[in-house]
Image: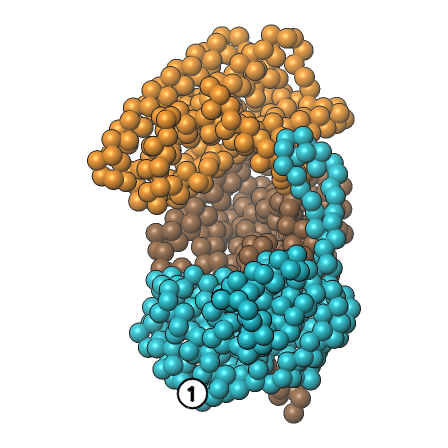
Amino acid sequence: MKRSRKREKKISAIRLYRRYVGIHIRSTMQYKTSFLLTTVGQFIFSFNVLIGITFLFNRFHQVADFTYSEVLICYAIVLMEFALAEMFGRGFDLFSGMVKHGEFDRVLVRPRNEILQVLGSKFELSRIGRMFQAVIVFIYGLLTADIDWNRWKVMTVVLMLIGGSLLFAGIFMIQAGMCFFTLEGLEFMNILTDAAREYGKYPVSIYGKPVLLFCTFLVPYALIQYYPLLVILGRTARLWYSFLPLAAAMFLIPCLLFWRFGVRCYRSSGS
Amino acid sequence: MITVNNISKTYKVAKRNAGFLEACRNLFHRDYEEIRALDHVSFQINDGEMIGYIGPNGAGKSTTIKVLSGILTPDEGTCEVNGCIPWKNRVAYVKDIGVVFGQRSQLWWDVPVIDSFELLKDIYSIPKETYQMNLEELTELLNLSELLKTPARQLSLGQRMRCEIAASLLHSPRLLFLDEPTIGLDAVSKLAVRDFILRLNQTHRTTVILTTHDMQDIEALTNRILLIGKGRILLDGSPQDLRQGYRTMDEAVAALYREYAI
Amino acid sequence: MKKYLSFFRMRFLTGLQYRAAAAAGIATQFAWGFLEILVYRAFYQADAAAFPMEFSAVVNYIWLQQALLALFVPWLMETEIFSAIVDGNVAYELCRPVHIYHMWFARLLAHRISSALLRCAPILFISLFLPAPYGLTLPTDPLTGILFLLTLILGTLITVSIGVVIYICCFFTISAQGIRIFYSAACELLAGQIVPLPFMPDVIRRVLEILPFASMQNVPLRVFSGDLCGHQLVWAIALQLFWLAVLMAAGWRFAVHAETRIVVQGG
């Protein structure tokens, strides 16, 4: 009895989210030119990054034992992870606006989970511009890199995409949680979002030991990128590295708790 | 039934001064000021009452509304609405209330109004039959049939407010908060909105708490006024009591504000 | 002159109001600069012989790019001006006793200089004290310093004059957003903000060095560490002067043309 109630609740949550997405897509289509331009913009700004990598490899041929094709695979996977997180989790990324304009009050007077409502408040379809590029680059990397594909490696890629997008979503959540305490100076979170995407184009190990340690134990970027990548490229015998993205996804838990804490403070201080 | 008992709430606000030197100084140091938004506020509202909640800007009106609608937790005091404590068990509580923030829209800007309504149906998990019935009733009373297919951004302010009110009532709440529902409306729309609220109260016995600066709204709709100033309830009585000896309601209220120096 | 200074004062004061934003911006730029240096270190370790500049010159380039970001970054524009053009409120600007070209030029310049001033000092200061290969190294002779300042001023003026041309372009298109996106993306790459020009393949580099984009940050940032010197430097300064003259003249003509269009069509 209780279980079926729970299931019903889940179904209704999914239906509600789908309804939100439907409204966003219809709204976006009201401004077709703008949508098209943003999508193309997403594509060409990522394209600039790709050109940068190409220029450097044209001169140096490899970096820290990674070849051009291998770096492209890394870049494409991180870009996909980020694009997915942004497409679905943008509501948290843009949350400061919601607090500033008092729209979060509206969320609180509605009988639904706050997280679901914030997720539903934004759906960024234009991120398919980035996604599109990432897929093309990924395919190019696949064709040119010397990799023996097997089921295990395919699974690793899938786990990377899941773990990576959840990790980025968690960081958006921390950023949103901070909006409850201050609306100023949140730009610094861009080190953990945009910079991580931008510099995630290279395997984390090229930045040296301290950065690798930071990205392994503090904010687990290396777990969604460097370690599983080693499995894909056949550079390590430790096949369990493939599951590290799931560990990275656990990062979402403290993020969630922090956000909940923020909501509690907001409701008791009303900042 | 709403019972509010000795509720208090204090905010901390950063001071910011004008001028170049001050701005430089603020880089390093910032002063905070404590503001008592609510200072031991108590009152009681019975089911089916319509209350006018008035007071100058910054008197604590919206803080009270936020506490009653479960958004804010007060520092001290108790409050019970329909047997629930608003800030505890938020999700269960807010199913039964409707809120119209006059200055902020809850309709989605770029899609037809009916799409926003359908979304609300899912948000409040309103059963199909109830939704259909309420939608029909609201469409008729608020004259929405022409508007439902229009995107909200193309509506006039008056048309939009009618849709906003309908949006807040789709789930048949027992308690409705109206925050400046007639702000910026033309005479025709104002009258339409007032008529509708009166009818709603008569037919469904919905409790209505109305905050406004428009004294005509108060006179037309309510038979009880709560006046708040500097976080305290200063007066609780009927519009007739308040108006005694003055030509208009506005004069009476202005005189009161002066008397209490708020 | 006074009215132009007041744009600057307004901007600076608004900037000061947002102290936390400035602090956050500095922290961010610092992190980006740091990671960028680590990327080049990795490539340096991979093949030092293929490095087209001294490693220290690259480090200087990166720190200066971060510190002076607001002077050169293409997307820094005034959104109010864009929206004024799109919704037709620009007609009010024409009522002011200042020509729109001068006014927009002054506003954009003020915007860029004030943002840069607020942010550059901490980054420069900290990067000066970083350990040897990763820190900023000052030029050894005063002449380089003077030439750096000169090319910096010219580069900034060129960036602003292109910016104003972009504003005016919006009079003639339906979508200001499109122009901004394409200009920002192109400028970012062509000006050497993604990869410094010396790192690009030779053929491409030789073409890019003639374009106005190379006269923006590329020249001053490389003059600073002596990477650009001798007759190459003279040539670069001459090109800067040439492009500044061309862009300002074109912008002015363009603005006059746009103005008559507004008067005739009523926005």
Q: Nearer the viewer, residue C3 or A119?
A: C3
Q: Reply above or below: A257 against C78.
A: below
Quarter residue B48 falls in: bottom right
Which quadrant, please, contains the C terminus of chain B? bottom right
Q: Nearer the viewer, residue B231 or B32?
A: B231
Q: Amino acid at mark 1?
A: Met
Q: Which residue is mark 1?
A: B133
Q: Colour of chain B?
A: cyan
| Horizontal arrangement in the rendering, residue C175 relative to residue A213 (left or right) | left
For image coordinates 49% across by 35% down, the residue present is C76
Q: Reply above or below: A136 against C45.
A: below
Quarter residue C235 falls in: top left
Q: Residues within 10 Å of mark 1 (few under 14, many from 20)?
A: few
Instruction: Determine the secondary structure under disc 1.
Output: helix
Which quadrant, please, contains the N terminus of chain B? bottom right
Q: Reply above or below: A65 against A236.
A: above
For image coordinates 65% across by 8% down, the residue present is C141
Residue A164 in view here: no
Q: Which chain is represented by brown in the image?
A: A
Residue B204 in view here: yes
Q: Nearer the viewer, residue B142 or B230?
A: B230
Q: Colour of chain C?
A: orange
| Residue A254 pos. (x, y %) | 73, 61
| Residue C215 pos. (x, y %) | 46, 21
For image coordinates 44% across by 32% down, the residue present is C187
For image coordinates 56% across by 54% down, the residue present is A97
| Residue C13 pos. (x, y %) | 59, 33
| Residue C18 pos. (x, y %) | 62, 40
Label 1 chain ID: B
| Horizontal arrangement in the rendering, residue B50 relative to residue B64 (left or right) | left
Q: Nearer the viewer, residue A164 or B205?
A: B205
